[in-house]
Image (tube, rainbow, N blue to C red):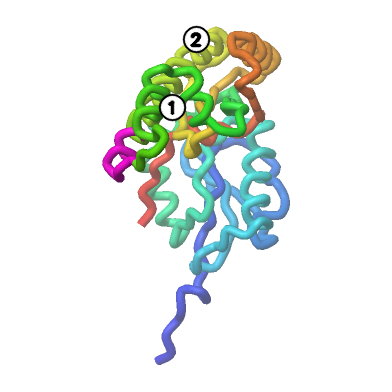
Amino acid sequence: MASTSAASRTGLYLYGITVADQMACPMGGVGGTDVETIVEGRLAAVVSHVSLGKVRPQRANLAAHHRILRDLAEERPVLPVAFGTIAGNEEELRHVLRRNQDALAGSLGRLRGKVEMGLKVYWDLPNVFAYFVATHQELETVRNRLFRPGRTPTVEEKVELGELFVSLLQQARQRHMRRVREALAPCSVEVRAIDPGEERMIMKLACLVEKDSQQHWEEGVRQAALLFDDHYRFDYNGPWPPYNFADVDLRLT
């Protein structure tokens, strides 16, 4: 008897969860597939039929995934699901929707009429370490002691200097983040911090904002930027579906 490979079987690629009412599905899912909904109670899962083999994170597939969610979010609350999430079959997906009905419906109610805005703040400098040496006497003193003429610092001393720099960097990030979050609090429903992931980035914030308050939020960003000098750069983006506020854990098996 011939075996059936995973690549030849189909599953349901999941874009997101929304409310169960009449809706026109966006066109062109991952891999050019049709997009449809599976309704279970108060919820509707937005899906495409795909191979059970892993969907590759190619540019076209990523673009399709995010476009579907963006189109949905323009018309209705939506809980985005991570790229590449596939349910084995319809009954499995329906079981998950039934099991999580109240929690998902509550999240959709919380996100109705809201979008996500993003903010990144950077040190706009050619060399962050040199800037900290120039603005933190403690760091300058240690650097000068370890690297004075005619002396070669040990590995342990270099580690000591690096740890001091990282500590001062984190203190500055926390201090600056408090100022920015205070400035954005009046125009945001919720603000969440995301790991910056690079030395020059001070903070990366995801802000949940009422759709009709986007201009108010952008003005809040401009006011926050006025608290900083030319050594800092503010970049904001959006609106997006509320990726960082969906809190979806479907536990598909």
Q: Where residue 94 sits: x, y (%)?
A: 43, 50
Mark 2 or mark 1: which is in front? 2
Asked if residue 196 lies left or right of residue 146, the reply is right
In three-dimensional space, the C-alpha distance between marks 2 and 1, rounded to whole angstroms, equals 27 Å
**Type of amino acid under label 1:** Gly
Q: Which of the two residues, 80 or 193, is positioned nearer the viewer here?
A: 193
Image x and y of residue 102, in percent: 39, 32
Q: Look at the image and give the residue range highlighted in magenta.
A: 153-161
Q: Magenta span: helix, strand or loop, mainly?
A: helix
Q: Residues within 10 Å of mark 2 (few under 14, many from 20)?
A: few
- Please name the residue shown 53% across and 51% down the image: 83
Which of 225 and 241 lies nearest the eye of the viewer? 225
Element under label 2?
Answer: helix
Q: Is residue 159 magenta?
A: yes
Asked if residue 212 shows in the view, the reply is no
- Which dot marks residue 106? 1
Label 2 sits on what residue type? Glu
Residue 141 position within the rendered picture, expressed as x and y whole percent measured from the top left: 38, 22
Q: Is residue 233 visible?
A: yes
Q: Disc 2 designates what residue?
A: 182
Quarter of the rendering occupied by the N terminus: bottom left
